[in-house]
Image (tube, rainbow, N blue to C red):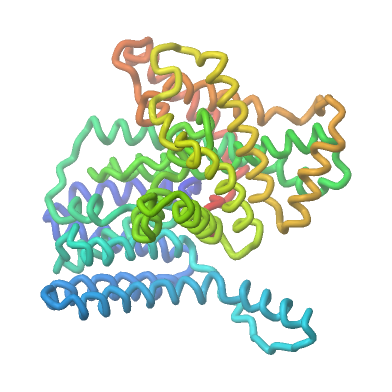
Amino acid sequence: MLFNSLEFLIFLPIVFLLYWHVFKPLRWQNFFVVVASYVFYGWWDWRFLLLILFTSLCSFASGILLQRFDESKKWRKVISGTNIAINIAILGVVKYYDFFASQLVEAFSGLGIQLNLTSLNIILPVGISFYTFQALSYTVDIYRRKLEPTRDVIAFLAFISFFPQLVAGPIERATNLLPQFLKPRKFDYALAVDGMRQILWGLFKKMVVADTCATACNEIFADYATKSGGELIVGALFFTFQIYGDFSGYSDIAIGTAKLFGVRLMRNFNVPYFSRDIAEFWRRWHISLNTWFVDYVYIPLGGSRNGKWKTVRNTLIIFGLSGLWHGANWTYIVWGFYHAFLFIPLFLFGLNHKRKDVVAAQSWHPSWKEALQMLTTFCFVVIGWIIFRAENIGQAWGYISRMFCEFDGTFPKHGNTPLIYCGIVLLVEWMQRKKEHAFQIPHRSLFAYRPVRWIFYFAVFVCTYFFMGNQSTFIYFQF
């Protein structure tokens, strides 16, 4: 079920009303969350439900067993390792088997050896990477004794399957989300209103910005070999804002929807296109995934504690895994290493933790130095998105080389309307860069007056409504 669909428009208010007015006891409320989430997820294909249920029950059982064998270090390693292996194996077979099998066949074929590896052609379950990582965090946190295992299977199923963030994140930690299903929740009017504002902003970014950019972007990438350098630059910008509007829009809708049910999810984006270097960009982009890799891969590998060269190795590993997480294609892996090689010089010179503050914190505009830093970082990010968007490495190389070699200093005069919407997003988010989300209303502003707010909301809603015909799925559903 898509957030930007008529089905969800009907589904959400029904679930909201039943959640707060019918299923009031905590256990029944959690049970209803599970039912609603499984209906939401099973809307694509009910068979996917079997996989998420199996993943959930394996992780739940691992928590119980870890508690039972609390004094045995050996059995704790066996139990946690088995559950991790099961989940990674499922993810690996479903998502990566066909890709690596085909690569092995090609590699051995070049050596004159024929391998007979049959393709599985399995339909990729929506959001499998998201809920698998969420389940893994539960087992690891219990093994590390950061969390007590729950014996409430209903609350645990609600934690894994909570529908707002089930298929595209944020990837929640059990330490944050699970406790919220173990204690009574009360309706918070202010939180719900703030959630509605965030949903509206997310829909605007998805339907007005991302979907509009997608149409123009697809046309340019499909026929890039005949386009001028200026057109290719515009096409790259279209995808840059498409993926941001699409994914951050989803995150805003998910976080806002969760607020309607009294649940707080972690922030997943923090104005990443205003970053002043690549390290800052990765602290602001897909925060839940990046911090997951840091906590569960980078730090266990030794982090930055064992000298610079081992830290470089660990950095390459997590960026490579981050690229691979996005899909079974060399373009994602190269995209990950591309960012690693941009990040490593910052680490070697001790600059990777330099910029953690809000850009232009004491001013309404950046300094010339900050503006140049943001523009440079943005250009590097755009090039990376070309690699990410390309169907293969050859297309990525051809697109980038033609973009530079065929650029004559001119840009297309028509068909750039989506960039206006992109400019609106940048302007609004720049003005609200110190806030949790762009539609969080400042207390001392023109928007503090109710008539002004409602006129503004109505204008955004009408604008979004007129773009409903461009309805499309979210990019990150495929990951």
Compare residues 455 and 418 and report the one nearer the observer.
Answer: 418
The image quadrant of residue 28 is bottom left
Q: Image height check: is 426 above or below 452?
A: below
Q: Is residue 468 left or right of residue 164?
A: right
Q: Can residue 282 be seen in this view?
A: yes
Q: In this view, does 10 lie to the left or right of 234?
A: left
Q: Quadrant of residue 432?
A: top left
Q: Note whether residue 40 is visible.
A: no
Q: Where is residue 267 in the image (x, y as percent from the top left)?
A: 36, 40
Query: Residue at image x 49%, y 34%?
Result: 272
Image coords of residue 190 (percent x, y):
23, 30
Residue 29 falls in image quadrant: bottom left
Q: In this view, does 352 lie above or below 389?
A: above
Of residue 350 and residue 261, the one placed in the foreground of this image is 350
Between residue 239 and residue 67, name the one nearer to us.
67
Residue 197, compared with residue 41, is above or below; it is above
Q: Where is residue 235? Give x, y as percent.
A: 73, 38
Along the horizontal axis of the image, is 376 left or right of 168?
right
Left or right: 282, with 197 as reference point: right
Residue for point 84% across, 25% down: 410
Residue at the image point whose x is 73% and y is 57% from the top: 393
